Image (tube, helix red, strand yellow):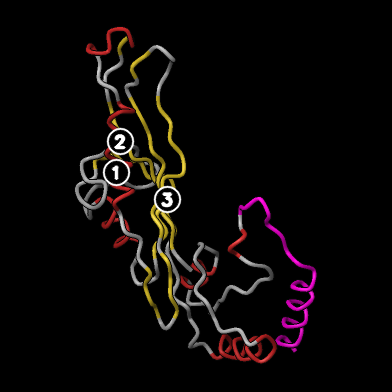
Amino acid sequence: CNGTMRFDVITHGIAAHSARAWMGRNAIHAAAEILNRLNAYENRAIEVDGLTYQEGLNATLISGGKGTNVIPDECRVHVNYRFAPDKSLAEAKALMIGADAGAELGNGEHVATGGVFEGFGIEMKDESPSARPGLTSPLAQSLVKLVRERTGREPLAKLGWTDVARFSMLGIPAVNLGAGSPLLAHKHDEQLPESDLLLMANLLEDWLK
């Protein structure tokens, strides 16, 4: 599965009354450069062990300001980076904020020393490693064979993060296998056909036997 990192990219300004804006510095306006860098970033499709992983770098939340007539002195853009299993968590972090920024979970704001967000304040919120496909395991191969025979489907990369990454860190073979389409996740028409559940149950029962 893809790894994931979530962090705030922070701008700082100087508060002032909006009628005398020249007495302050607008942190929300300064965040435009963060959005420019996000828009300019080219998300890559990366092949790992024969499977293609699509990376993603996106702003998912933005906050700033203390009042409707106050020049904001801080703005935070919450960023989520989904990275392929061709890189470690440390390598992914270096691409975003530099190798020596010092930003770790729970240690507050640090300035990015390199990467996409060089020069901006960074506060880490979440980080989880990726996991390679792991299809060389005999158990995984037998499951792939059964699914292929029953459905004609080949293995695909899992683009979201899952607990497979935790098992991978422990050296335990693991794959993602589930009913329904992940392309519908979080969408208005998210759904799961009953037939998919029945197929899953049959596959798992036969494989375990």
| Total numbered labels | 3
Q: Earlier in the sequence, mark 3 or mark 2?
A: 2
Q: Is residue 126 above or below residue 145?
A: above
Residue 24 % position (x, y): 25, 15
Q: Amino acid at mark 3?
A: Asn
Specify the quadrant that holds the C terminus.
bottom right
Q: Which residue: 43% across, 31% down?
A: 63
Q: Amino acid at mark 2?
A: Ala
Q: Which residue: 42% across, 54% down?
A: 127
> Marks 1/2: CA distance?
6 Å
Residue 155 % position (x, y): 54, 81
Which numbered marker is on residue 32? 2
Q: Main secondary structure of the magenta part?
A: helix
Q: Is residue 59 above or below residue 161?
A: above
Front-lying residue, 196 or 101? 196
Crowding around mark 2 (Cα neighbors within 10 Å: few <14, some 14 to 19, many 20+) is few
Q: Earlier in the sequence, mark 1 or mark 3?
A: 1
Which element is circle 3 on? strand
| Circles 3, 2 touching at the beta carbon (< 8 Å) | no
| Circles 1, 2 touching at the beta carbon (< 8 Å) | yes
> Marks 1/3: CA distance?
16 Å
Residue range of the region highlighted in magenta in the rendering: 186-209
Instruction: Tell me where residue 8 sits by quadrant.
Output: top left
Residue ID for mark 1: 36
Residue ID for mark 3: 80
Which element is circle 2 on? helix
Residue 197 belongs to magenta span: yes
Front-lying residue, 149 or 91? 149
Residue 129 % position (x, y): 42, 63
Residue 72 belongs to magenta span: no
Give the label, 3 or 2, closer to the camera: 2
> Marks 3/2: CA distance?
17 Å
